[in-house]
Image: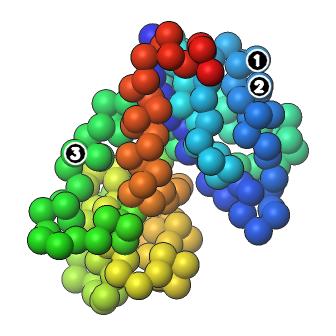
Amino acid sequence: MKTCISMLRGINVSGKNKILMKELQTMYEAMGYENVRTYIQSGNVVFETKKKTDIALAKEIKQQIEETFGFDVPVIIRGLDEMNHALEHNPFLKQKDIDLSRLHVTFLSEVPSKEHLAKLKDQNYAPDEFIIEGKEIYLHIPVSYGNTKLNNNFWESKLKVTATTRNWKTVNELVKIATEPTDKIKKK
């Protein structure tokens, strides 16, 4: 079984695209996924599956959400190994006195093209900083993520891929949930 984390973009934000996490969990279980757990009301689901690649999983879940809830929601999947890598390789953690509450990770649906990446090479959005590595964008937003230009719409516009962002606490919590022993999950 492969442990996966799915991150839905744009649900339960300002009352738009509302999905209760219990209903989402029930949908995942009906799809045949196992040990399904959700984290906070923003579309984070940890589950186990024997099925398909991450891209195929994302497409299948996206389609089922549309059929079940009636709206189109982008879905990004990461395996537990990929989430661990994101957690362990955040380049901003090397900075002295970094405020962890100001770190975020933007997860991309795929690696952006070199052409699109090149357009961002010398851009400066101070005080906000970003580092792109593969399918992750590590962000340091010292003032407020709610006011940064480096939001999901910005990345999707510039890189032409789907993006969803999670704060550092959520990334850590998702890995923690995904690594809980299965016997502990079933007792909850």
Q: Position of residue 100 (x, y in %)?
A: 31, 65
SS of the residue under disc 2: helix
Mark 1 or mark 2, which is nearer to you?
Answer: 2
Tag shown at residue 88: 3
**C-alpha distance separating marks 1 and 3:** 33 Å
Callout 3: 10 Å neighbours few (<14), some, many (20+)?
few
Q: Quadrant of the C terminus?
A: top right
Please give left or right for residue 111 compared with residue 151 in the image.
left
**Do tag 1 and tag 2 residues touch (Cβ < 8 Å)?**
yes
Q: State whether residue 21 is above or below residue 156.
A: above
Instruction: Establish if 40 lies above or below 159.
Output: above
Q: From the viewer's perspective, is residue 31 above or below residue 87?
A: above
Per the model, the C-alpha gap separating discs 3 and 2 is 31 Å
Residue at the disc numbered 1 = 30
**Which element is circle 1 on?**
helix
Identify the element where label 3 is drawn. Answer: helix
Q: Is residue 93 above or below residue 54?
A: below
Distance between mark 1 and mark 2 Cα atoms: 6 Å
Which residue is found at the position 45% from the left and 11% from the top?
A: 1
Query: Residue 26: which numbered mark, if any?
Result: 2
